[in-house]
Amino acid sequence: MNFLRNYLDKQKPKFEKGGKLYKLHSVFTGFESFLFVPNRTTSSGCNIRDAIDLKRTMIIVVLALIPALLFGIYNVGYQHFNAMGTLADTDFFELFFYGLWRVLPMIIVSYVVGLGIEFAAAQIRGHEINEGFLVSGLLIPMIMPINAPLWMVGVSTAFAVIIGKEIFGGTGMNIWNPALLARAFFFFSYPSMISGDKVWIAGMPDGFSQATPLAEAAQGLPTTYDMSSMFWGLIPGSVGETSTFCILLGAILLIATGIGSWKIMLSTFIGGYCMALLLNYTLPASNPYAAITPITHLIMGGFAFGAVFMATDPVTSAQTERGKWIYGFILGVMAILIRTLNPGYPEGMMLAILLMNTFAPLIDWFVVQGNIKRRLKRAKAMQL
């Protein structure tokens, strides 16, 4: 890599102040910092130095997403050929490459639109380009309907980056998860594309009808999927949300590296379980979700994916240690509550996370104020 380092060093003066390409300074530094560790050092003040910077944090999250992404690509092909009735005559590679052919354009559109806007915003402001969209750009296609037209994916991504990030100041300043904001925009702008049977299977033939487990539950129909299928992920659904097993593999990596908060993950599952258990005993039998067991709720839809990859976003989640427990527990409760009591929206994780993103600073404020009051009481007691 020395030749690339030397080449960048030779080109750098052109992008520095006074150089003929200075207007593209942010773009150059963005690519340079992505390829190499920045060679700048702090010269004054008190600074905390750590080997884990934003770039490494984002790359670890991307690596944690890979198992769910690869399985999701395979599952897209599996669901397509199963709907066509030719699954028995199709090998693994045909399934995978068909899924890749459908998913890869969505990933490309997401990154091109999102990074293009972030590059433009950085140039206008004269700021450096951050690596925050490395994760959001992959999350967005993983939670979108596989049959979504690419222009809809592009518009939703643009809305999330401009309204969800840039107007607040960019990476680290946003109050809502950008990927979920893209899905929320898509859901309310193009509801026909994200509700109904046709959403979940790519290239579904005419006359074929199949629903996700959540859609079946919402209609009060007996589910055609057992617990094993829902855990391993061979069911219709968004690309990254079907396999709870692959999501748990990503969770292990996030927890082991300290990137994802295990407190938020665990408390979210506890909150969801407790709420589902309570509703099992309190809701009338006429509610189709009343009969669903708590464990089934946790592996259906986007609950596990949201708990592991969305709720733990370090920018939009609670920051205090006690606040993380409170934040995650209420999030799990709200997700099951919305899913169960809202007949027009069988999934509740997206709205629950966006709602808790809004209240995360308030949770931290109450936690901090509580700590201050307890310390003042201890100080007064010591004086006595």
Image (spheres, rainbow, N blue to C red):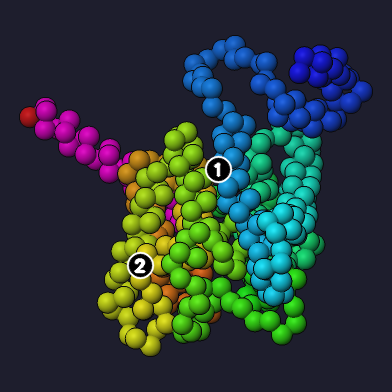
Write the residue at 35% across / 67% down: 294
Q: Earlier in the sequence, mark 2 or mark 1?
A: 1
Is the residue 41 above or below the residue 279 in the image?
above
Q: Residue at x 76, y 18 (%)?
A: 1
Residue extending furthest toward the bottom: 286
Q: Position of residue 210 (x, y in %)?
A: 61, 78
Q: Which residues are magenta?
A: 355-383
SS for callout 1:
helix
Q: Residues within 10 Å of mark 1 (few under 14, many from 20)?
A: many
Task: Quadrant for residue 131, please give it.
Answer: top right
Does the segment drawn in magenta span residue 232?
no
Q: Is residue 5 left or right of residue 185?
A: right
Above-or-below relation of 11 to 264: above
Pinpoint residue 252: horizontal percent, then vertical percent. 45, 42
At x 79%, y 36%, the residue is 123
87 vs 124: above or below: below
Residue at 42% across, 62% down: 298
The front one of 264 and 26 is: 264
For the stretch drawn in magenta, the main secondary structure is helix
Q: Is residue 197 left or right of residue 13?
A: left
Dot 2 surroundings within 10 Å: few (below 14), some, or many (20 or more)?
A: many
The question of residue 369 being in magenta is answered with: yes
Q: Position of residue 23 (x, y in %)?
A: 85, 30
Amino acid beneath label 2: Pro
Quadrant containing the C terminus is: top left
Q: Tell me the amino acid under the disc marked 1.
A: Ala
- Measured in 3D between alpha carbons, the distance from the residue under mark 2 to the one under mark 1, in whole angstroms, is 26 Å
User: Residue tagged by mark 1?
Assistant: 64
Mark linked to residue 294: 2
